[in-house]
Image (cartoon, rainbow, N blue to C red):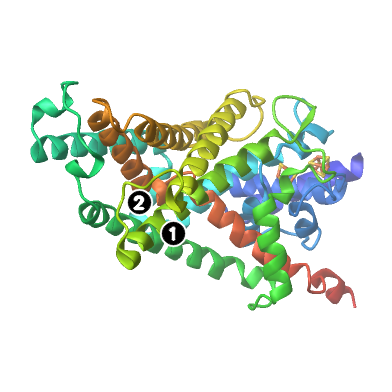
Amino acid sequence: MQALNELVQQAKDTALGQATLSANEAEVARQLQICNACRYCESFCAVFPAMTRRLSFEKNDIHYMANLCHSCGACLHACQYADPHDFQVNIPQSMAKVRLETYQTFAWPKSMGKWYQHNGLWIAICLTVSLAFFITLIMMKQNSSVFDGTTVLGFYDILNHNALVSLFAPIFIFDVIALGMGLFSFLSKITPVTGQVSASSEASLEATQNMLTLKYLDGGHGEGCNNEDDAFTLSKRRAHHLTFYGFMLCFASTTVATFYHYALGLHAPYDLSTLPKMLGVLGGVSLLLGALWLAQLNLSRHKDHGDAQQKPMDLGFIALLILASLSGLLLWLLGKTVAMPLLFALHLGSIMALFLTLPYGKFAHGFYRGAALLRFAVEKRQPSQLILKED
Ligand code: SF4
Ligand code: SF4
């Protein structure tokens, strides 16, 4: 215990000495020094093997490891140095705080990084503006009586396919550029601290597999992570899978529909027996169920998990996913009734708000985590620098 206390004091001094570290980064460095002496959680996830390759933690190491953490909670529930112990170790919480700094630091354009801090407000503004935009647009194309509950219109009586593409394509392209630029800057910072630049096909394949299966939400033993208490659960992993694959199916539906429209000359609306509709309905149901499940898990989460300050960002993103998928499914079911114009505005408004907020909200975490997992797959294939130094 004496030796560990000395080590902690040394870690505090080291962290304080690293003037360039923010308070959150210094706190991660302090806690990782304790973990490096303890190593009880070595087999839980990728963070700990990455940690044991280091004796001290510089800024870029900290951001790399913070994004390797999946916030599964396993190391908090296993930790003998967590609250009420004086060491106050809470790795998932301190990592979550640094992740928010990652998103802000690497946001593109830089000035937009501040919206991560006020993400709930950002989502509310985008949703209000988007809904108002589509309601006004529909009223201008038709007239105000379109919402009085007596008019039955077809989907494309209101806005045709080309108009929809011209509204959404620029936002989508901007999202790809903004997220791509952020990811590029992040990779350029964490690559030097994780070894060789190129990723072998073996490393890339492993990282992709770990991303798609969310391997590090299995608690390290396959029984799952922790959410509200010490019990292991696979709920978080499954809810993420439903949400992610639902989102991807909806994206595939839109892509196939675009191909049908421009390449095959087959125009919407499509029957349920067609590929775009099947993908869209399946994706919508999966996305809705996954997002509702994530909301329930987030609201029932243990009070010491994660960063409470980020709840509006988490819940705001989940709320947008629920609104977009639910309105899409209702639009399919009630598309030939008087409710159609209002559902149409609600669906397009929520999709537009979702796309406007994608690069500056919770959605970004998947990209940064994917980049960190790729670098981990590269790093673990190289000899440890510590062993090389000893030699
Ligand atoms: S989280 Fe706690 S138990 Fe796990 S390695 Fe760190 S100090 Fe040890
Ligand atoms: S919370 Fe889970 S993923 Fe994060 S460091 Fe702890 S065990 Fe690893």
Q: Residue at x 33, y 47 (%)?
A: 356
What SS does tag 2 mark?
Answer: helix
Q: Dividing the image into 4 quarters, which one contains the C terminus?
A: bottom right
Quarter of the rendering containing residue 155: top left
Front residue of this view, candidates 227 and 260: 260
Front residue of this view, candidates 345 and 107: 345
Taking the image as drawn, is residue 19 in sight? no
Crowding at label 1, few (<14), some or many (≥20) Cα neighbours within 10 Å? many
Q: Does the residue labelled 2 lie within 8 Å of ligand 2?
A: no
Relative side of 283 to 214, left or right? left
Quarter of the rendering containing residue 324: top left
Query: Where 273 sits versus 174, above or below?
Result: above
Name the amino acid, label 2. Met
Q: In the rendering, at what x and y percent does residue 132 appear?
A: 20, 34
Q: In the rendering, at what x and y percent does residue 56 appear?
A: 73, 59
Q: Residue at x 63, y 48 (%)?
A: 26
Circles 1 and 2: CB distance less than 8 Å?
A: no
Relative side of 42 to 355, left or right? right
Query: Where 50 sits versus 238, above or below?
Result: below
Q: Mark 2 points at which residue?
A: 112
Q: Mark 1 points at which residue?
A: 179
Quarter of the rendering containing residue 242: top right
Query: Where 206 sits versus 118, above or below?
Result: below
Spatial separation of the CA atoms under disc 1 and disc 2: 12 Å
Q: Dividing the image into 4 quarters, which one contains the N terminus?
A: top right
Q: In the rendering, at what x and y percent does residue 337 appear?
A: 27, 27
Name the amino acid, label 1. Leu
Q: In the rendering, at what x and y percent does residue 196 appear?
A: 68, 77
